Amino acid sequence: MNVFGQAWEGGSDRPGYTWRRMRVGGDLLGASVYELGPGQKSFPYHFHNANEELLVVLDGEPTLRSPAGERTLAPGDAVVFPRGPDGAHQLRNDSDGAARVLMASTLVAPEVVDYPDSGKAGFAGGTSERAIFRRADAVDYWEGE
């Protein structure tokens, strides 16, 4: 597969989070190429508890939001997002043209993803099982026992 090709497999058409994706991954290492149109974001600000991610900018100048603040990236820039709060991130395209990035990730399951802005956590099992929870709805350990 050529990451500069047009083999788009899916994406998101949610306003503010519109993107296209092509998968480039394997069994233990996954990767996708994302293309963000002008004014669009990748995903809500989040961090992973089980997986590390690597971002490589292929084209355009996306804005990275991280715990260190915001900064504009350029083609060839690479950023590693470690597990935990220090690896929190979100991409935004503030430019007039498209931005294209390669996101590679380890594929450890189960996985818990935290969304600090909205107070949610997401769970992904070893299969296609997924669920999102509001942390404010947490119950006591002994609830229902």
Image (spheres, rainbow, N blue to C red):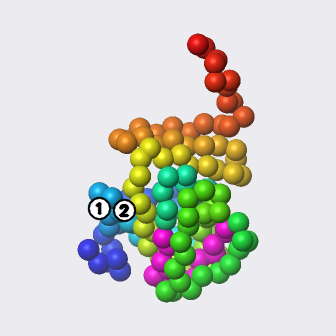
Q: Give the residue number, with chain letter if any, for mark 2.
A: 30
Give the total number of marks visible in the rendering: 2
**Residue 72 lies in quadrant:** bottom right
- Residue 26, x across and y down, in percent: 29, 61
* Residue at x-position 60% and y-position 36%: 133
Farthest-out residue, left: 1
Q: In the image, what residue type sits under mark 1? A: Gly
Q: In the image, what residue type sits under mark 2? A: Gly
Say above or below: 132 vs 21.
above
The answer to whether marks 1 and 2 mark residues whose Cβ atoms lie closer than 8 Å is yes
Q: Secondary structure at mark 2?
A: strand
> Can the viewer see residue 24 in this picture?
yes
Say above or below: 59 vs 139.
below
Q: Callout 1 environment at 10 Å: few (<14), some (14 to 19), or many (20+)?
A: few
Whole-Å distance between the Cαs marked 1 and 2? 5 Å
Q: Nearer the viewer, residue 94 or 120?
A: 120
Q: Which mark is residue 44?
A: none
- Residue 41, x across and y down, in percent: 59, 64
Q: Give the residue number, with chain letter if any, for mark 1.
A: 26
Say above or below: 16 vs 143.
below
- Residue 45, x across and y down, in percent: 64, 58
Q: Nearer the viewer, residue 40 or 129?
A: 129
Q: Is residue 103 magenta?
A: no
Left or right, residue 1 beside residue 13 = left
* Residue at x-position 72% and y-position 71%: 68
Specify the quadrant that holds the C terminus: top right
* Residue at x-position 46% and y-position 81%: 58
Residues rendered magenta in the picture: 54-66
SS majority, magenta: strand
Q: Is residue 60 magenta?
A: yes
